[in-house]
Image (tube, coloured by chain):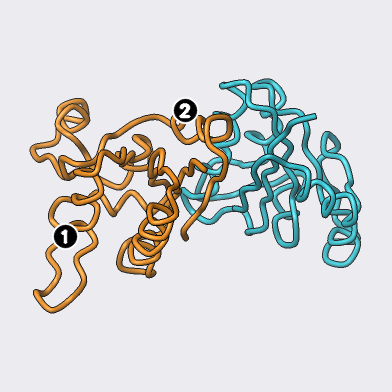
Amino acid sequence: MSFNLIIIKQSPYQGRQSHEILEAIMSLALFDIDHRVVFFEQGISWLFAQQAPTEQKSLEKQLSALPLYGSEALFYCQEHQTLLFPDQPLQQSVQPLALQDLALWCRQADHVEVF
Amino acid sequence: MRFQLNVYGAPWAANNAADVRCFVEAAWTAGHDIARVFFFFDGVYHGLLSQSPASDEANPLAYWQSLALADVDLLLCIAAASNRGVLDEAESARYQQSVTTSAACFELTGLGQWATGFHDVDRIITFK
């Protein structure tokens, strides 16, 4: 089973760059490149429910649209969520992933890109 | 082995151009192939035509021009470049700007070229 792994470890709302990360993921879906996205460390805060940014477009809305583009394999690191954001509700369309499984994916993936 | 190199950082905020040069020299010495260099995020500033470093400082743009002469495709993400004012002639006209700001050795292209590396190279190496 061939796949590519995208790991997002930076916080959201880092200016235009955060939107460009989503555009890159959408391009993988658009070109039918099999990929899995894992939100890691501070990257888990991309998944907070009910985001209401005042100065730019909501990343939550764009994230929720990823499956419509064909990017459906969305995960977050379960251990990091427990340690960093234990009481924070997350988007429900994203699945938990254990660190040991992520380590396995890092070895199995054709390419690993870290944002 | 065939490589795609991604450059994500601005030229004057990191040593990414020098790192790419070291990598490319080592790769070519070992008989490997560089499929393309893709510039994304603030990395598109590498394509800025008007970079004018002092004569005793490194000149990343001169290196990119030499790489283009060696038939390596230098690709700027068109959306990231346009947002940051790095425009070729076509984009300059499209946005009704009065100047072209990208160096001629670079091509503005879509993220599809970035994605292409995920299926047509052996390794993708990213320089931030």
Chain A, chosen colour in render: cyan
For label 1, count other residues whose C-alpha is less than 10 Å away and answer few (under 14), some (14-19) or many (20+). some
Secondary element at image label 1: loop
Vertical comparison of B93 with A104: above or below: above
**Residue A109, label in figure:** none
What's the residue at 64%, 58% (across, down)? A11
What's the residue at 26%, 38% (across, down)? B71
Place of residue B100 in the rendered image (x, y in percent of width and height, measured from the top left) = 12, 39
Place of residue B103 in the rendered image (x, y in percent of width and height, measured from the top left) = 17, 45
Q: Which of the chains bears the disc numbered 1?
A: B
Say which residue label 2 marks: B112
Q: Which of the chains bears the disc numbered 2?
A: B
**Three-letter code, disc 1:** Gln
**Three-letter code, disc 2:** Gly
Q: B9 or A42, which lies in front?
A: B9
Whether labels 2 and 1 belong to a single chain: the reply is yes
Place of residue A82 in the rendered image (x, y in percent of width and height, measured from the top left) = 91, 61
For label 2, count other residues whose C-alpha is less than 10 Å away and answer few (under 14), some (14-19) or many (20+). some
Say which residue label 1 marks: B51
Vertical comparison of B21 with A57: above or below: below
Secondary element at image label 2: helix
Q: CA distance from mark 2 to mark 1?
A: 27 Å
In the rendered structure, the answer to whether residue A17 lies left or right of residue B22 reads right
Residue B34, picture quadrant: top left
Q: Quadrant of the N terminus of chain A?
A: top right
Place of residue B14 in the rendered image (x, y in percent of width and height, measured from the top left) = 39, 69
Residue B60, picture quadrant: bottom left
Circles 2 and 1 in contact, beta carbons < 8 Å: no
The chain drawn in orange is B
In the rendered structure, the answer to whether residue A28 lies left or right of residue B5 reads right
